[in-house]
């Protein structure tokens, strides 16, 4: 009996650990996104066809890129501001009001840019209407209160809300998307249900958590935007480096090839979330250890790093071996071109894991400038090499360019840490 109790106590402590809770709830959010994405892919390919599926994903890539503008680094800076003011409802209300106001304003600017590009400069001719119907996703991102619940350390509600939103989206696809002409409604439905759930969460924040919504304080908003400028450009460059491949491929290939590639890319980008989730989960504890006990910080980070490398290796090996089966399940058919892309891109999750230590050290040491430099050096490399190789070899060349990008970013981060923060490099690797 006592042995059983002794076993239960560590498990309880393990679950109560804030880093573990953060990881679990973030994993629930991402895994629900993954599951719905996997379920929706064969449904969409069957109802709208491979070419329209590629254009829907291309539109989504443009929207996600503009969502970096909408986020403007608040997803990293705002949780800290909320955590500091957890017990001061008045100050917290002002922070919440200003962050939401800023993000909604940025969503309106991003929408204006799309409309100007589509109708003023005649851009996006193949998928103009799909893209315009997708702008609701910008406002869904602007009203997403994930950063608030992260700061309040109450992630359960937003996790459940995210799952419900994705289930509604899946139901919308089944009920309303039946033929290629309806492809413009796919991203619209995702944005519509996401926005509806987010507004419900805002009502909960106001009604049950006592947060008041004030008029925007433009001086505070402007200060926040200036403070987040490096985070914004770092996020933008990182996003282009990781997710810009589909946009590059669109200049060289047909809609059908885009569909083939986007199917493989979706699978791999889902798997690539693993190292990002680890960084988000361990960041609070790593930051505390970095400030209070430097040797304990390095011990903790090394332990995490080796486990992440092992996990990344298993994920990549599994994706490589199971590539034909994965593509057949998702597409309900034989797509040999997608299998080739997936086998090549399967190396990415492991290669992304090798930089977890460097990125975590830069974040806990508040090395925003180094992150900014690394992000843009990587972005320039990725755009250059991927454009060249895609023009030369098509989708296979793009895969090779993206794989090399993951290796280059590790080298860049090592070099920058060696030049500017040798004590961190030596403490972790030596």
Image (cartoon, grey):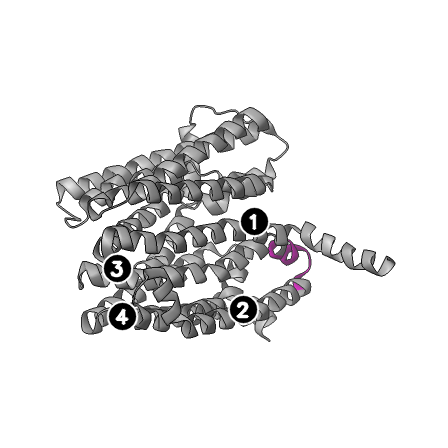
Residue at the spot of label 1 = 25
Instruction: Find residue 255 and report its image quarter.
Output: bottom left
Q: Is residue 61 left or right of residue 117?
A: right
Residue 20 in picture, x, y percent from top left: 63, 54
Q: Residue at x 30, y 44 (%)?
A: 186
4 or 3: tag closer to the N-terminus? 3
Please tell me whether mark 4 sits on a helix, a strand or a loop. helix
Mark toward the viewer: 2 or 3: 3
Q: Which residue is mark 4?
A: 337
Q: Nearer the viewer, mark 1 or mark 3?
A: 3
- Mark nearer the viewer, 2 or 4: 4
The location of residue 33, given as percent across then percent down, is 44, 50
Viewer-side residue, 423 vs 113: 113
User: Which residue in the protein does label 3 denote?
Assistant: 259
Please say if the residues under marks 1 and 3 sit with CB atoms less than 8 Å apart. no
**Magenta span has 292?**
yes
What span is colored magenta in the figure?
A: 286-294
Classify the position of the N terminus by image quarter. bottom right
Give the CA distance from mark 2 to mark 4: 27 Å
Q: CA distance from mark 4 to mark 3?
A: 10 Å
First in residue order: circle 4 vs circle 1: 1
Neighbor class of circle 2 (other Cα within 10 Å; few <14, some 14-19, many 20+) is some
């Amino acid at each position: 009996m006592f042995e059983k109790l002794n076993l239960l106590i560590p498990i309880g402590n393990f679950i109560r650990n804030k880093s573990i809770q953060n990881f679990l709830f973030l994993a629930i959010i991402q895994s629900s996104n993954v599951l719905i994405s996997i379920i929706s892919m064969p449904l969409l390919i069957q109802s709208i066809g491979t070419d329209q599926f590629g254009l829907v994903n291309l539109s989504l890539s443009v929207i996600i890129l503009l969502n970096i503008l909408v986020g403007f680094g608040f997803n990293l800076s705002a949780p800290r501001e909320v955590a500091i003011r957890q017990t001061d409802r008045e100050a917290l209300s002002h922070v919440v009001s200003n962050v939401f106001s800023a993000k909604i304003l940025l969503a309106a600017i991003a929408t204006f840019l799309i409309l100007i590009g589509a109708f003023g400069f005649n851009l996006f001719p193949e998928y103009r209407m799909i893209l315009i119907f997708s702008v609701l996703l910008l406002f869904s991102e602007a009203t997403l209160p994930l950063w608030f619940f992260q700061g309040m350390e109450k992630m359960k509600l937003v996790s459940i809300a995210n799952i419900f939103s994705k289930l509604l989206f899946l139901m919308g696809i089944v009920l309303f998307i039946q033929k290629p002409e309806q492809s413009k409604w796919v991203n619209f439905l995702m944005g519509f249900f996401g926005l509806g759930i987010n507004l419900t969460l805002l009502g909960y924040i106001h009604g049950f958590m006592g947060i008041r919504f004030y008029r925007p304080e433009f001086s505070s908003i402007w200060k926040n935007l200036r403070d987040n400028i490096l985070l914004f450009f770092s996020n933008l460059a990182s996003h282009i480096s990781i997710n810009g491949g589909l946009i590059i491929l669109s200049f060289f290939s047909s809609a059908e090839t885009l569909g083939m590639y986007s199917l493989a890319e979706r699978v791999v980008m889902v798997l690539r979330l693993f190292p990002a989730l680890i960084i988000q989960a361990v960041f609070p504890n790593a930051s505390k250890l970095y400030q209070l006990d430097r040797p304990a910080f390095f011990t903790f980070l090394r332990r995490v790093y080796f486990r992440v490398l092992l996990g990344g290796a298993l994920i990549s090996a599994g994706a490589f071996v199971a590539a034909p089966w994965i593509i057949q399940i998702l597409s309900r058919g034989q797509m040999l071109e997608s299998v080739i892309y997936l086998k090549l891109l399967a190396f990415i999750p492991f290669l992304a894991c090798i930089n977890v230590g460097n990125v975590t050290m830069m974040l806990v040491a508040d090395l925003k400038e180094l992150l900014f430099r690394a992000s843009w050096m990587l972005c320039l490399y990725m755009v250059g090499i991927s454009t060249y190789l895609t023009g030369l070899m098509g989708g296979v060349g793009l895969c090779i360019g993206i794989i090399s990008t993951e290796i280059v970013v590790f080298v860049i981060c090592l070099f920058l840490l060696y030049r500017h923060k040798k004590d961190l490099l030596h403490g972790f690797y030596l």
